[in-house]
Image (tube, helix red, strand yellow):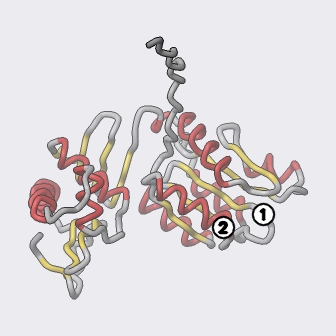
Amino acid sequence: MEGRDDPAPSESAQPLHISSPVLILGGPSPARNELTQRLRSLDVKVLQSASGDEARQLHAEEAPALLVVDARLARRAPALEDVVDDLRSGSDDTAVLAWFDADAPQEDILTLCHPVDDHMVGSIAVEESLRRLHFLTGRLPAQRDGERLIVGDLELNTSIRTVTRAGRDIDLSDTEFRLLRLLMRHARTVLPKSQILQEVWEYEFAGQANIVELYVSYVRKKIEAGMPRMIHTVRGAGYVLRPARPAEAEATGEASGP
């Protein structure tokens, strides 16, 4: 039987690559909520702030490379230009995607945006915002080849596959590296064992909680050796990674073991 020719395979689409975390500065809005959900579905950590002071604190703690700034009059934070200048802190490794009203004066756009930045005016399309964040990521020197995550004194770099804490190099296996990257991407968020198992080992939770516990204990021993704890067990919920506070007592409801 004569077979028909198969169509030529199309070139696979390039997946979105967006730096993590992303700080969204602006008041609550449907666009902010939808963008947050879409970014999280891409495993990108999202920080939200409606005020300059909160944005400065989050930026100091998480060092996001990408900022989404809602400059629309109904959503913008007070003294927005000053806040954004503070968040940039003279670094070349920060880029802004700014949202403006359709009738925003050109002067306002040029004042807020730098050459490396991007902006949108009028109706905000979330999918278009994602594409623009993808391209902004590629413009940043420190983000072109990988991802840099910082939580407290702990730093992970995917491009050169290094982990350091307080300047000390830490050697991790591939699985330990993936586990720590997941916990750092979702710092301060409790992750259930089922989610960790699915995202690190890439299969559904099927009574294999022991392997999660085992690898959490491995990672703990390496990043917490002689140093304050960062990975905490929340009984009945999962695990959470937080910046270490030497004087902080263990919170009620957390166990010392995995």
Residue type (three-letter) at the residue carrying disc 1: Arg
- Left or right: 236 with respect to 9? left
- Which x, y percent locates residue 179? 24, 53
Q: Taking 197 as reference, is 51 left or right?
A: right
Q: Quadrant of the C terminus?
A: bottom left
Residue 231, percent from left and from top: 21, 66
Tell me the residue that label 1 is attached to: 72
Q: Position of residue 159 (x, y in %)?
A: 35, 35
Horizontal and vertical percent position of residue 174: 19, 41
Residue beneath the point at 46% across and 61% down: 60
**Residue ID at (22%, 50%):** 201
Using the image as rendered, state which of residue 73 and residue 131 is in the foreground. Answer: 131
Q: Secondary structure at mark 2?
A: loop
Residue at the spot x=18%, y=62% of the render? 206
Of 206 and 153, nearer the camera is 206
**Cα–Cα span, label 2 and label 1:** 9 Å
Residue reaching furthest front? 1
Relative to 62, 155 lies left or right = left
Position of 5 relative to 104 (above/below): above
Residue topped by disc 2: 26
Furthest toward the bottom, the residue is 252
Q: Quadrant of residue 213?
A: bottom left
Tags 2 and 1 touching, CB below 8 Å: yes
Q: Amino acid at mark 2?
A: Gly
Asked if one can make out residue 171 in the rendered structure from this viewpoint, the answer is no
Judge the density around disc 2: few (<14), some (14-19), many (≥20) Cα neighbours within 10 Å: many
Q: Earlier in the sequence, mark 2 or mark 1?
A: 2
